[in-house]
Amino acid sequence: GGGNLLLEVEYAAHPQFEVDGRNILYTLQVTPWQAALGTSISVPTLGGSVELKVPAESDAGRKLRLRGRGLPGNPDGDQIVELEIIAPAPVEEAQKKAYKALAKAFGEKV
């Protein structure tokens, strides 16, 4: 005779992605100039990397949606990409000068 088979599926934690229902959450690190000027960046998804357009004047914490790139279902989930702005440490003299010029341009005393 046939009986019912009940399966419980658990997802293992992933170092890059978090799961929220059918949606996948991913934090993308961008530089201040990428956030300010806009850029196109390769972003990992469950189905492989895709190009994500980061609009100009994006703030830290801005969320961008990749439709249908989350967990499969009806409908498929989305991948939500949250921007984290990371300023690289100035190592070379030209980089330090660029940071000083940037600070001056934004009205800070250097």
Image (spheres, grey):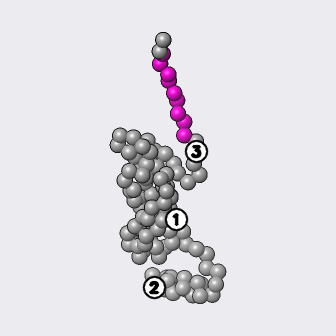
| Secondary structure type for disc 2 | helix
Residue 2: mark:
none
Q: Which residues are magenta?
A: 3-11
Crowd rating for badge 3 (residues with CA inside 10 Å; few <14, some 14–19, many 20+): few
The label nearer to you, 3 versus 1, is 3
From this viewpoint, which residue is outermost toward the front? 1
From this viewpoint, which residue is outermost toward the left? 75
Residue at x 39%, y 40% (from the top left corner): 73
Amino acid residing under circle 1:
Gln
In the image, residue 110 lies at what x, y percent?
55, 86
Amino acid residing under circle 3:
Ala
| Secondary structure type for disc 1 | strand
Is residue 87 at least partly visible in the picture? yes
Residue at x 37%, y 53% (from the top left corner): 67
From this viewpoint, which residue is outermost toward the right? 91
Residue 105: mark:
2
Is residue 82 at least partly visible in the picture? no
Are discs 2 and 1 less than 8 Å apart at CB?
Answer: no
In the rendered view, tell whether residue 40 sits above or below residue 2: below
Q: CA distance from mark 2 to mark 1?
A: 24 Å
The residue to which callout 3 is attached is 13
Residue 70 drawn in magenta: no
Residue 29: mark:
1
